[in-house]
Image (cartoon, coloured by chain):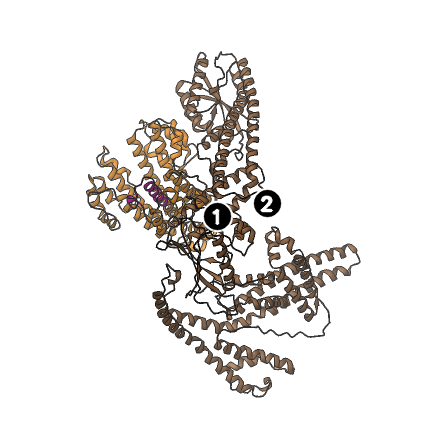
Amino acid sequence: MYGFEALTFNIHGGYLEAIVRGHRSGLLTAADYNNLCQCETLEDIKMHLSATEYGPYLQNEPSPLHTTTIVEKCTLKLVDEYKHMLCQATEPLSTFLEYITYGHMIDNVVLIVTGTLHERDVNELLEKCHPLGMFDSIASLAVAQNMRELYRLVLVDTPLAPYFSECITSEDLDDMNIEIMRNTLYKAYLEDFYKFCKKLGGATAEIMSDLLAFEADRRAVNITINSIGTELTRDDRRKLYSNFGLLYPYGHEELAVCEDIDQVRAAMEKYPPYQSIFAKISYGESQMLDKAFYEEEVKRLCLAFEQQFHFAVFFAYVRLREQEIRNLMWISECVAQNQKSRVHDSVVFIF
Amino acid sequence: MGYGFPRQDAFDGLHAFGEDDLCSAHHPCRIRASRRLLPRRARAPPIQRLALLDSLIVEQCCLVDLDWICELKLNNDKSPFQRTFVSQVKRCAEMTRKLRFLKDQISKAGLASSALPAVQPDIELENLELQLAEHETEIIEMNANTEKLRQTYNELLEFKLVLQKASSFVVSTKGHSITEDRELDENVYSRDDYVDRSSLLEQDMQPGPSNQSGLRFISGIICQSKISRFERMLFRATRGNMFFNQAPADEYVMDPVSTEMCRGLPCGGIDKSDSCSLYSQEKVQRTVFVVFFSGEQAKTKVLKICEAFGANCYPVPEDITKQRHITQEVLSRLSELETTLDAGIRHRNKALSEIAFNLWRWIIMVRKQKAVYDTLNMLNFDVTKKCLVGEGWCPVFAKPQIQEALERATNDSNSQVGIIFHVMNVIESPPTYFRTNRFTHAYQEIVDAYGIARYQEANPAVYTCITFPFLFAVMFGDWGHGICLLLGALFLIARESKLGSQKLGSFMEMAFGGRYIVLLMALFSIYCGLIYNEFFSVPYHIFGDSAYRCHNSTCRYQFIPQIIFLNSLFGYLSLLIVVKWCTGSQADLYHVMIYMFLSPTDNLGENQLFWGQRPLQILLLLLAIVAVPWMLFPKPFILKKIIQSYGILGTSEMDGDSEPDSARQHYEEFNFSEVFVHQMIHSIEFVLGAVSNTASYLRLWALSLAHSELSTVFYEKVLLLAWGYNNPAIKLVGLIVFAFATAFILLMMETLSAFLHALRLHWVEFQNKFYHGNGYKFKPFSFASLVDEDD
């Protein structure tokens, strides 16, 4: 129903849109962050959070708190909200919501596989997995020795199966090809998600393609920067870029041949939306790039809420909440390690 | 003295003096004379702004409180952890958490905590804190012990099931005996570590089956829900080279592993994390399986998959005698464990029931304490003067009580310095406080639901007490129905003391809360019903024929132009009605009113009611026209002038008065154009509303007609129709239908609809003529409300 979402959207999506907008208004504000940044101990953080929506999740934690507990409980809240929405959702919103978690699924698969490669305990690894990306047989990933087995044993049952077609090899797993696998999977996932959103049409397609294009471009830049100085060939590198986004295809050509960060910068500055990001960081520096990208992403995600009758608000909400949890983790870590001077380094204010 | 908790007399005070009295303050008070009082007026009880200065000697000071003060937040700019009493608040929060934990444990153990406060000497809060910590660790320890036992018990139970089920597979598939010399070791049961056991399994598996055809097996138990996925995974991993056998376990077992995983988490939690705790753990249907496979590699894979799926593997010897031996041993250990477990739980329940005895009192105590510190946190700490400064509102009449309370507090705490208490003069409008009684409370609630009166604004509740039931009755008028309502209301009022003390359902609570409204509604319905001559829709000619009724809403107009406008149009209409009534004229009032606007100079003809009507109408029309700009223009200009003079006044007072961090600086910028637009909207609304609202009162007529018609229908078409038959059964059915229709449709639904319309007429048509309702309520600090609140 292109352009007529307002007529029919509320039949199925109205309730959940209201819910997600309600959740969004529960996000921490700049005033909250200012207060949190002044905290002296983790108890103070807990006390401040108890006045927010996190209150019920933290109120029963006994006193010596740890950063992990805070992060775990905050994530639990997101997961509860997500599960509630998923239960209420009908097609195609439910598929859309499931798509949101595939990224975490890929990360979890990679985490477990890398972990087993380095002979870590599976239970320990499972605790580190993001709860949104859990699937039934995730623990049996440890059984697999190579990609083919990984696919045949476990992943064939998961929604990630179609993304695997690109990277089935019989090579033994090692760090390098796991990383390549992650990026190939991610590429396939983003393209699939992009296609799905296009198919939905209307405001969803419009906003989601913008958000996903940004995500794809950011990944392209990250892949380029991370692969500088590794044995990854230019062609291999280009294969990992998603086939859509602002940089596709000419930007990818330029990124593929970059040899240092300043070349990346030169390639990116041709694109006005990214010019402002690179303008914030000085030459030769890549540390602050993440934060600059996150800030830009948060800005775009917040804009998604300006329009009504589309699914992108769900995506935006989950992402914003994740950013908030990252912020909380950073603040808690800084407080716990007495590094309060660095507290503003990585916190991205949402409102 | 390092502790910030008050002595117990803080609470003694409360018990001894009852609700509107004070409590104690530990510390020092001095009273400074109040400077100026607000003028007393006869509307809402005047409220005064107070400043309390508690001087602070040590870091501890406990104010306290009195039912008559509503504190202002002076510390809004500070985050919670920067306030003065933050550590005490934190300690109270910690104690609350412990109490919640204990309460949860008690309710899980199925014990009832006594809601009645136990008659025991009060203990001090510091002791309580220690006691709570002790109790918590004790309970956690006992839980851990029981859980450990329970886990072992579950493992044994699973082993027993596996032995029962799997042995048949093993024996039937492998028809020969293999000697397996593995003593049933303690290690098998204490699953400290999975790896430990899997190594045992290896020892177990390797020597035995390898001397035959290389076929090995692993037996274990797994959740029923996972079995198909488990089998599929095994099939894939071994490329189909395996044989899978399964049988559902007869008993429900708790998963020992998940228990163990949960135990790793901190045990104080009440939310998700303790779904694994002793009593809440779900029992799941589990299935025993045996997998046969060959090869060393396959074994590692199978073991890994078992681990991944959370399947617990247990070694089953293939020798039958060995099996019997092990089974017996397992059974004996099971019964042993059962008795230990029971004893543990009994011990734990005993400890819990002891706690349960005092729990409620502790909870209230901590809650009160926390509220005191929360209030103290709202006070400002003046560093230079070493004192706490608080500001709040109190009703003027309660001032002596507060002073008395503060003095008593000073004496109780034996401090040399008194609490300074003085009245402030402020620009902000105070909160509104109406003293209500049982009767007027419900009416006040109706008005408050629309909006809280501005300070010193006329309270419409006074009129509502009568107009509301009256308007209701105009719509509901039927004295038969009225009597039914009256009986209901009298029942509620007669049992007032009994019903008031217990918890009612939401509907009953609503009816009970509005019992006095229902009473008046019923009385007025009887009155209107008598005038309408209706008794269950049957006409009774008691007062003869009279159907003309007049409604003249009593309004108190705020503005003279509004009064003039309204009266010159609708007041005139009312006058005409009365005149027509008295003279019995046939004049068409509708026509008179319309032509008063359309052609005011024309002759009235037969519609003339009295001499000089035409000039009067022209005069009234002119007055109404003049009133419109009158109500529009002057007010914004006057407001502007006032605010300008206030600004000067405010700043000059600010200079002369060095009130530390007073909350008085917040008044808004005056924006003339905004006020003017607002006034314009208001005027237009008033003029249009005058017409539409008057028309709105037609609903009185429409609903009263609907009510009487509906009851006539039930009376004639049901009762009379059924009565026409000779068959008593039909008569009975007719009577029953009539009774139900009367009770549910006429008495309940019609009551609701008439109630809602009366509500609307009050909120929209009546109150918008004069009532701003933009004040805020006076919410005094009170211990009594703390005790009631549930968490």
Residue B191, given in percent of the width and then of the height, sits at 46, 24
The chain painted brown is B
Q: Residues within 10 Å of mark 1 (few under 14, many from 20)?
A: many
N-term mark: 2 or 1: 2
Q: Which mark is residue B369?
A: 1
Residue A163, given in percent of the width and then of the height, sits at 35, 36
Residue located 43% across and 75% down the image:
B632
Please say if the residues under marks 2 and 1 sit with CB atoms less than 8 Å apart: no
Residue B674, given in percent of the width and then of the height, sits at 38, 69
Q: Colour of chain A?
A: orange
Q: In this view of the protein, which residue sits in the foreground, B385 or B392?
A: B385
Q: Is residue B285 above or below residue B98?
A: above
Callout 2 amino acid: Leu
Q: Secondary structure at mark 1?
A: helix
Q: Which mark is residue B116?
A: 2
Q: In this view of the protein, which residue sits in the foreground, B543 or B340?
A: B340
Query: Which SS type dominates the magenta stretch?
Result: helix
Asked whether residue B107 appears in the rendered view, the answer is: no
Is residue A337 part of the magenta span, yes or no?
yes
Q: Quadrant of residue B535?
A: bottom right
Which stretch appears magenta?
A322-348
Rendered-image quadrant of the N terminus of chain B: top left
Callout 1 amino acid: Gln
Q: Quadrant of residue B731?
A: bottom right
Callout 2: chain: B
Q: Secondary structure at mark 2?
A: loop
Report the number of discs: 2
